[in-house]
Amino acid sequence: MSNRRPERRLAPSLLSADFGDLGSAIRAAEAGGAGAFHLDVMDGHFVPNISFGPALVEGVRRRTRLPLDVHLMISEPARYAPVFRKAGGDTLVFHLEATEDPRGTIEAIRATGAGVGAAVRPETPYARLEPLAGELDQVLIMSVHPGFSGQRFLPEALPKLATARRQLDEMGSAADLSIDGGITTETAPDASAAGATFFVCGNSTFVGGDVGANLRRLRESVEVGAARAVH
């Protein structure tokens, strides 16, 4: 693996966009400097909500060339990985809590040709993910309880981020370190300073104001945190 950390990127979560005019939301986010799009897939079983399936992922794929980061908040992620890869997912992120065989799930996702990410809920210790980190393209730390958008950032995610950052750096890993939940101009600097490189931003991108301006402000706040990490 490379010794260079990936660049910090913003990944607008389309769950917070206007589904009645999704094409416009995608174009506005692209123009505002989005580095990827994050798609939350929920099954009503692993999390208490239902969002969308592969058909929407396929529709988004037709409207953008940016990477699609598909967050599988579902039971049996290995079973459904091929269909979400076929729909256009570039990285498929499963939850450690959703499978009794995480290495088998990693192998199943890798076999589809997609990048592989693993996520942990706020109550799950990072120690459970630590043995797998070297096999991943993305480590995702949840800073809210998965299932609903618009929740407040949980600051206990920050020590997990810092631990993950140290581990990835020690391994020379080029994996993204992702933070998801409650990312705003107030919370992004702390997450960036703790070492996050991939910022999932939903309501702070699409709810209120101009999408391009929202993303520019988020980018500035990320850079503030990055500068703080250096010094």
Image (cartoon, grey):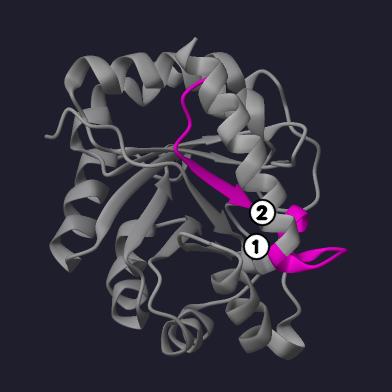
Instruction: Identify the residue at image location x=18%, y=67%.
Output: 112
Q: Which residue is mark 2?
A: 216
Q: Quadrant of residue 76?
A: bottom left
Disc 1 packing (10 Å; few <14; some 14–19; many ≥20): some
Q: What amino acid is found at the position of numbered circle 1 in the picture? A: Gly
Q: Which residue is mark 1?
A: 44
Instruction: Identify the residue at image location x=72%, y=72%.
Output: 17
Could you say which is closer to the camera, residue 90 or residue 43? 90
Q: What is the x, y in percent for residue 159? A: 55, 13
Instruction: Identify the residue at image location x=66%, y=56%.
Output: 215
Q: Quadrant of residue 205?
A: bottom right
Outermost residue toward the top in this view: 231
| Residue 148, above or below 44 | above
Which mark is first along the chain, 2 or 1? 1
| Residue 39, above or below 201 | below
* Total marks in image: 2
Query: Which range is magenta?
Result: 194-212
Q: What is the x, y in percent for residue 41? A: 55, 65
Could you say which is closer to the camera, residue 54 or residue 114? 114
Under circle 2, the secondary element is helix
Residue 195 inside the magenta-drawn segment: yes
Under circle 1, the secondary element is loop
Q: Quadrant of the N terminus?
A: top left
Residue 60 inside the magenta-drawn segment: no
Instruction: Identify the residue at image location x=52%, y=77%.
Output: 53
Q: Is residue 221 visible?
A: yes
Q: What is the x, y in percent for residue 152? A: 81, 37
Could you say which is closer to the camera, residue 180 or residue 95? 180
Q: Is residue 122 visible?
A: no
Residue at mark 1 to residue at mark 2: CA–CA distance: 34 Å
Q: What amino acid is found at the position of numbered circle 2 in the picture? A: Arg
